[in-house]
Amino acid sequence: MGRVGQLKDFSSLFDERILERAKGYRDAGMVTSVAQSADDGDLWHAWVAGTLGFYDVDIRIHRGMVISAACTCPYGQKHSYCKHVGAVLLTIVDRQGERDRRSSGDTLPDDASKAVRWYWHSQFPGGVSGDAVDVLDEQDWDAVRRVLESGLGMSDAGV
Ligand SMILES: [Zn+2]
């Protein structure tokens, strides 16, 4: 995790309801592979698990200000600041806080996140990556959706 400057308050970019959902995603450990571009320190990328698959999130942060964001989810096609972007920003803030307290390490996933990861790992012992999206068929996603919706009370319907 490189230098980003302390991320400034970004809540005004988001609809209040979306930010609430973003916190749910962050708390459930749905944000994976948060990384700062090696070539362009302002550019961040992450994968966020959703009920329809992994979404590809790009965020540009300059001097602690969120400049722009993009997400591949349906909502993100029309609005820059969807819940997935919010979840990634909250995760970046968390990691900054953590970095201040100790030098390294990820937050432990909670139970719901473990359930999802258990499912993926049982299907893909080699690990979960963006490539897994292409491997999962409709039946697999139905199973993942059931895990998410029953375990987390989450649905992509509506937002
Ligand atoms: Zn999104």
Image (cartoon, rainbow, N blue to C red):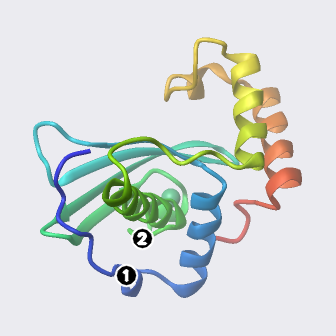
Q: CB atoms at circles 1 and 2 under 8 Å apart?
A: yes
At label 2, which amino acid type do we have?
Tyr
Q: Nearer the viewer, residue 72 or 132?
A: 132
Q: Secondary structure at mark 2?
A: loop
Residue drawn at the location 75% of the way across and 29% of the way down: 118
Determine the image quadrant of residue 92: bottom left
Residue linked to disc 2: 81
Residue drawn at the location 51% of the way across and 26% of the way down: 129
Q: Position of residue 127 (x, y in %)?
A: 58, 19
Determine the image quadrant of residue 109: top right
Q: Nearer the viewer, residue 132 or 89?
A: 89
User: Relative to residue 64, is residue 91 drawn left or right?
Assistant: right
Furthest residue to the top?
Answer: 126
User: Relative to residue 12, is residue 22 drawn left or right?
Assistant: right
Residue drawn at the location 82% of the way across and 61% of the way down: 153
Nearer the N terminus, badge 1 or badge 2?
1
Q: Position of residue 89 (x, y in %)?
A: 40, 63
Above or below 123: residue 100: below
Local crowd size for mark 1, using a 10 Å CA cut-off: few (<14), some (14–19), many (≥20): few
Residue drawn at the location 20% of the way across and 41% of the way down: 37
Q: Position of residue 57 (x, y in %)?
A: 40, 50
Residue linked to disc 1: 13
The CA span between labels 1 and 2 is 7 Å
At label 1, which amino acid type do we have?
Leu
